[in-house]
Amino acid sequence: MPHGYDPEWKPIGFANDKGEFSGISADYLQLMEKKIGVDFVPYDGIESWSQSLELLHNQEIYFLPALAQNEERSKFLDFTEAYLAYDFVIVTRKEGEFIGQLEDLEGKKVAAPENYYITGLLEQEQFKMNFVYKSGVQECLWAVATEEVDATVANLGVVSHYLNYNGFENLKIAAPTDYPKIEVKMGVAKGNPELVSILQKGINAISPKEKNEIVQNWVSVQFEHGVDMARIWRIAGISAGVILLIFGSFIYWNRKLKKEVSLRKEAEGQLRLSFDEISEQKKIIEHKNEEVLDSIKYAKRLQEAILPPTEMINNKFPNNFVLYLPKDIVAGDFYWMESVEANEEHGEINLIAAADCTGHGVPGAMVSVVCSNALNQSVLSHNLIKPGQILDKTTELVVERFERSIEEVKDGMDISLISVEYKSEGKAVVCFSGAHNNAWIVTKRSSIGVESNVLNQGDFYLHEIKANKQPVGKYENLKPFDTTEIELEKGDTVYLYSDGYADQFGGEQGKKFKNKSFKNLILDVVDKPLNEQKSILEKTHVDWKGAMEQLDDVCVIGVRI
């Protein structure tokens, strides 16, 4: 049964030097396996706590063995009872300024681990702290030890473990906090009550003595990292003094030093052999990486083949922009366009969409090829022109394709799709349908004749047209997609987008950009030419992201009537 974990939350749960899941929660799961006969398998290659949360949202894992419960996590997780509880404490340098309570952190630089329970508590305080966000507790403690920040706040169990490490000798537990104890629980993805019951049964089967042995084993662990050179020099100085004062001990120390030199040479020889082996392994890994990278680059060329050429889009939509920023070399986001010849009932119909497939990188790109082909079939083979009908048929084709797999596949896509039929005098009939992703229409009119959420700024009104709350793909309560028809005038602008732009973390406090800021940005630039809008949106995204990693693929389309 696959599960995630935080690779940096020592000693509760972490990835050891071999990349293996280890720590208190790992020992709990091992003991639970023996007692209830269920195998728990850590997901391979987890690099961050944020990745574990993403894997859970994507249903690639079923539970997380160690985390605290809060309101946000309760929306998508069910929890076992707590099996560990620790107080939160403030950690500072021994020679630092006196800090006796949380309020003393006002105006101070405080290291905070990203997406951790304690960080959420600190961010809600009424007094202001200058947060420096880190990937885990060890990095936070190191930031305090190296004087990058003034303090950090962490649970006592984790702090007690790390204070045994070399490099943290100048740290101290400065004061307790008023926060309730952090209760460590196991969190299970919503909809799996049987798994919650199994985990709780396993926890209950562990005796108090066994629990105490697990905790004591980890909290009391001490590590030696490298050679303490200062200690060696002190010993050498004392030895020299003894030699000068007691000449008779010279032979004894001389023999001892010769033995140490011999051992050192032997160790250096072993170290050289290890370096040679490591160098050889490095060459093999680099070669494999090159092969994988070449394959992904070729996959990028294949994926680009499904994207409509810029000339084709410009021909049908003279005033447009497409902002497309994949997170990786290949992407789960894609944009799509097709044009249908005129018939007796309609003039020429031009269709354009921004789509966001499940996942990103290579898996997302593979899903995007399936979804793009399904869109093409819906329009070209089944002669559909209404966006809602197109998404209905696309859903049918995607589900049919994935049902051929032996294992159940729930992948699909979110999408915003419009059709544009130009009329006389610069007007156009625009039909919209969406799966989770809404459409924004910006105009100087306060009403456009359909139900919408409206945001006003100066002369312009942003009308948000709601999409259906269901994906294109397998879904339990699937309903036909709605089609909303709107009459637009010359100068009106339609925006289609995936969630990657608004969900990007960044800024001074490392928070999400959010849809509200995205809408205000659109209203700020809507009166500018479309190519200039694209440049501003891209620069804003890059500036907001800063040094942080891009969270997801980004796709934003603007079309002016």
Image (cartoon, rainbow, N blue to C red):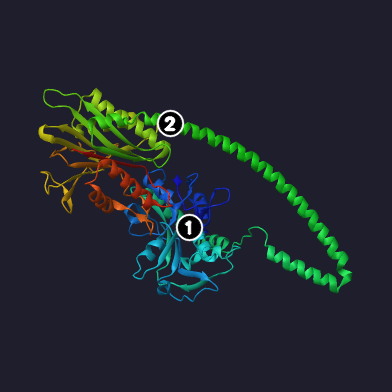
Q: Which residue is drawn at 83% across and 65% down?
A: 253
Instruction: Determine whether, in the image, residue 358 is placed left or right of residue 149.
Output: left
Provide residue 184's location: percent of width, then percent of height.
44, 60
Q: Which residue position is annotated with label 1?
A: 136
Q: How crowded is mark 2: few (under 14 residues within 10 Å), some or many (20 or more)?
A: some
* Residue 320 against residue 229 in the figure, above or below: above
Frontmost residue, 390 versus 194:
390
- Is disc 1 placed on a helix, strand or loop? loop
Provide residue 224's location: percent of width, then percent of height.
64, 60
Instruction: Determine whether, in the image, residue 293 is placed left or right of residue 103.
Output: right
Identify which amino acid the numbered label 2 is placed on: Ala
Q: Can residue 500 be seen in this view?
A: no
Q: Can residue 5 be seen in this view?
A: yes
Frontmost residue, 19 versus 345:
345
* Residue 496 against residue 189 in the figure, above or below: above
Q: Which residue is drawn at 40% across and 74% down?
A: 103
Q: Are marks 2 and 1 in contact (CB under 8 Å)?
A: no
Q: Which mark is residue 299?
A: 2
Frontmost residue, 51 versus 333:
333
Instruction: Determine whether, in the image, residue 249 is placed left or right of residue 410.
Output: right
Quarter of the figure that contains the C terminus: top left
Give the Cα separation between the discs numbered 2 and 1: 34 Å
Q: How many labels does the image show?
A: 2
